[in-house]
Image (spheres, rainbow, N blue to C red):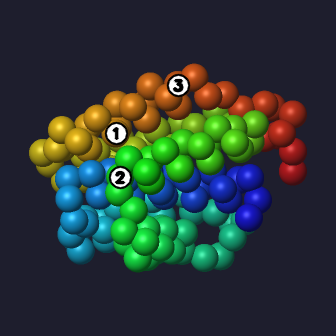
Amino acid sequence: MTPIENLHYAIGELAYAVAKADSKIQKEEKEKFQSIVAAELRSKEYSFDITDIIFQLMSRDGMDSETTYNWAMKEIRTNSHYLSPQMKETFIKVMEKIAKAFAPVAPKEQAILDKFFKEIAGINGDPVYYNQK
């Protein structure tokens, strides 16, 4: 996968972490989160459904939300030089929409979201990389 695809994969992992935070992922929750991520992250650079792949893999592996979150943030930091301000804004928007998708937001979900917003604020890409075509 390319660094851009890795960044998109990471935000899908973060959606999974939020979904998993309050216990088992409900079918409606999975579908709603997948639609949010897909709508915000449509990419012409790859033709697969990234959210479906993420939810299938993570569910199969029985990943907990903390481990998933840590993996996702590591991926974002590793590929951060490609994180444009527009992509960062989109990622924040995705996580905000996920937070509002199923009210009320459980304390564990809110903790993940707060941690993400704090960590992503300090990550900035390098225009040399993200402006490449």
Label whose residue precedes the other's in the sequence (2 or 1): 2
Q: Marks 2 and 1, Cα distance to the nearest angstrom?
A: 9 Å
The residue at 64%/63% (across/down) is 43
Dot 3: within a 10 Å radius of its alpha carbon, few (fewer than 14), some, or many (20 or more) residues?
Answer: few
CA–CA distance in space, label 2 to label 3: 21 Å
Residue at horizontal 35%, vertical 52%? 65
Q: Are marks 1 and 3 in contact (CB under 8 Å)?
A: no
Residue to which mark 1 is pinned: 112
Secondary structure state at the residue bearing disc 2: helix
Figure check: 91 above or below 38: above
Q: On the picture, is 22 further left or further right than 115?
A: left
Q: Count residues near mark 1 (Cα–Cα under 10 Å), then give few for <14, some for 14-19, many for 20+.
A: many
- Report which quarter residue 1 is drawn in: bottom right
96 above or below 14?
above
In the rendered image, which residue does mark 3 sit on?
121
Residue type, label 3: Ala
Q: Camera-side residue: 19 or 97?
A: 19
Vertical position of residue 19 compared to residue 77: above or below: below
Residue under label 2: 65
* Amino acid found under the numbered disc labelled 1: Ile
- Relative to residue 98, is residue 2 drawn left or right? right
Where residue 51 sits in the image (x, y, percent)? 47, 68
Q: Find out whether the residues at labels 2 and 1 contact each other: C-beta distance under 8 Å.
A: yes
Q: Can you see residue 75?
A: yes
Secondary structure under tag 3 reads: helix
The residue most toward the left is 104
- Mark toward the viewer: 1 or 3: 1
